[in-house]
């Protein structure tokens, strides 16, 4: 009786229309600097720092950009 149940379960599990699926979550980004509630003098430079990770691609394969809703694309991003 057990050998009849296993093929039936395999048949039920393979009846989806999608076939195989692959889950690719977006990269995780955490802003490290500036700290919350920090102040910058008017016209002063703002140091931006973030940590990025992706469970699928190495960091070197990711394309990063920083943008502001006011100023558009900001300075180039460099990996450290």
Image: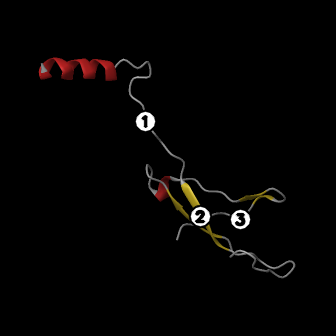
Tag 3 and tag 2, C-beta contact below 8 Å: no
Image coordinates of residue 65 in percent, x first then y, are 65, 57
Tag 1 and tag 2, C-beta contact below 8 Å: no
Per the image, the residue denoted by label 3 is 75
- Closer to the chain start, of discs 1 and 2, is 1
Residue drawn at x 66%, y 63% is 76
C-alpha span from label 1 to label 2? 25 Å
44 displayed left or right of 36: right
Residue at the limit of the structure toward the right, as seen here: 42
Q: Which SS class for mark 2?
A: strand
Per the image, the residue denoted by label 2 is 30
Q: Quadrant of residue 15?
A: top left
Choose between 53 and 15: the one closer to the eye. Answer: 15
Identify the disc placed on residue 22.
1
Image coordinates of residue 17 in percent, x first then y, are 44, 18
Badge nearest the viewer, 3 or 2? 2
C-alpha span from label 3 to label 2? 18 Å
């Amino acid at each position: 009786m057990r050998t009849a149940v296993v093929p039936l379960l395999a048949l039920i599990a393979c009846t989806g229309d999608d076939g195989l699926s692959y889950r690719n979550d977006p990269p995780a980004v955490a802003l490290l600097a500036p700290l919350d509630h920090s102040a910058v003098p008017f016209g002063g430079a703002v140091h931006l720092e973030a940590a990025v990770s992706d469970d699928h691609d190495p960091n070197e394969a990711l394309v990063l950009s920083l943008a502001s809703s006011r100023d558009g694309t900001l300075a180039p991003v460099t990996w450290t």
